[in-house]
Image (spheres, rainbow, N blue to C red):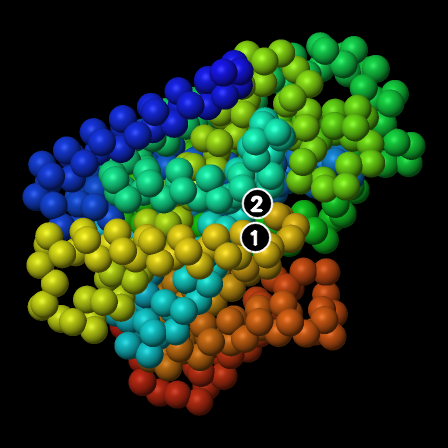
Amino acid sequence: MSVQLAILVGYIVLLYAISWYATQLVKRGGGGALNYLLAGRHFPTVVVATMITGLAVGGASTVGVAEGAYTQGLSAGWYNAAWGAGGIIVGLLVAEAFRRMEVRTIPEMMERMYGSSARLVSIVAQLLIMMVITSLQYVAGGAILAALLPSIFTFQQGVLLTALVFVGITLIGGYWAAGLANVINVILIYIGVVVALFFSFSNFGGFDAIASRLPAGGSWFHPISGVGLSVVVAWMVVMITQTFSVQAISQIAFAAKDGRAARRGFIIGGIITLPAGFLCAFFGIIAAAQFPGLKNAAMALPTLVTQITPLVGGLLLAALWAADISTAVGLLLGCSTLVTEDFLKRLMPGMISPKREVLISRLAVLLVSAATLWLAITSVGILKTVTTALAMTSSFTLLILANIYVPSLCRKVTGFWTILASVLVWLAWTWLPAVRIVPHVIYLEWPVCLVVFALCAVLSREPAEQLIKATAEAGS
């Protein structure tokens, strides 16, 4: 067995041991969906912080950023910096209020403020967003395995094995498994990335030698011009927007032991996340110098890893898998929470016992996994796909912030129509090229959502519930 494979197998065994231990924590909490899906609301600050970092630093932030940097240089790292900024801002503004609300899902929050129709359309939008992002973790994992063991795995086979590992860990331990595993994952990610980056520069002659071999004319080390200012701004708007309102992110605040843990955890997690993208961008730059002309740019980082020492390469490959796992597990559980809390429990009120809640949650994980695996096999372009789907969160963020700061303009009907508008804009952008009149769909999402919000404020009179502000004031 190769060193790389031995490290990877050892890491998987460790994750399953953590997942088994997590089942004991779920049982001690009394079982039920609250303990399986939200860890009984007992996450301390350190777990909140590593959950945020783990969710942020996934396949898009490692393999995906290196993919972008392979052609666009260091500026591809702004993707992760934007994510970190979003975590800090949410921690400062709303994470504590989210915890005090005692809700389990974003659609439940929407219903309390804007009525049952808002909850229904929220379920659809949130599932679309998270299923797309989840599928991209399989893509990154498949690229890693194909580069690690090309004689055993094709890219498609690597995607399948990655999905099976993600799903197994999720099924066994639930949210406690995700939280505890992410403490290990974040440590492994940063150790693996920093050590491998040092050895990569050393093995290929140092910074100056690598820079001299880069294709001429590229903005390899410019902080902005590689991807362009409009894209950097779009990433900032998208990532800050989504951290307010994606179920998988907000669920971390819902699971915190108290408001203080939620607030501090989001801020610390955001700070830890900030440098990850720029570090991984250097891998893409080194790959561009050493391996020009790769047919699949997503293979830039995995290909580079195979050229350094087996021990360091195995460490980084385990770190890359850790990044995928930390993101995918949280997303899968976020989807399962939506299906369990917002669909099945409402369809069969009072008929689901705590024991059945866990079983149904696990079945939901399997269903979502099958759908996301299909998306993974058919998706193209990691960062592009992620950020266009995340743009739909504009409506949720607008509704949440409006409920806090301008509640007099919020109406019962506002939730349904604003969220529906954001979904329609994204579908039009995805399927109708003529709609793409701006550099990024986020530049359409926010104006359209604002117009719909304003029309509802003018045409309707029934006010929405001012839930978030009242919750925050009650806890202050």
Q: Which mark is residue 453?
A: none
Foreground of the two, 70 or 450? 70
**From what the image shows, is residue 396 above or below residue 454?**
above
Q: Residue type at mark 1? A: Ile
- Residue 238 place in picture, x, y as percent: 56, 54
Dot 1 lies on which element? helix
Q: Is residue 99 visible?
A: no
- Circles 1 and 2: CB distance less than 8 Å? yes
* Residue bearing mark 1: 377
- First reached walking from the N terminus: tag 1 or tag 2: 2
Residue at image location 67% in from the left, 36% down from the top: 299
Residue 109 sits in quarter: bottom left
- Residue 93 place in picture, x, y as percent: 39, 49
Residue at image location 49% in from the left, 83% down from the top: 455
Q: Residues within 10 Å of mark 2 (few under 14, many from 20)?
A: some
- Residue 163 place in picture, x, y as percent: 44, 44
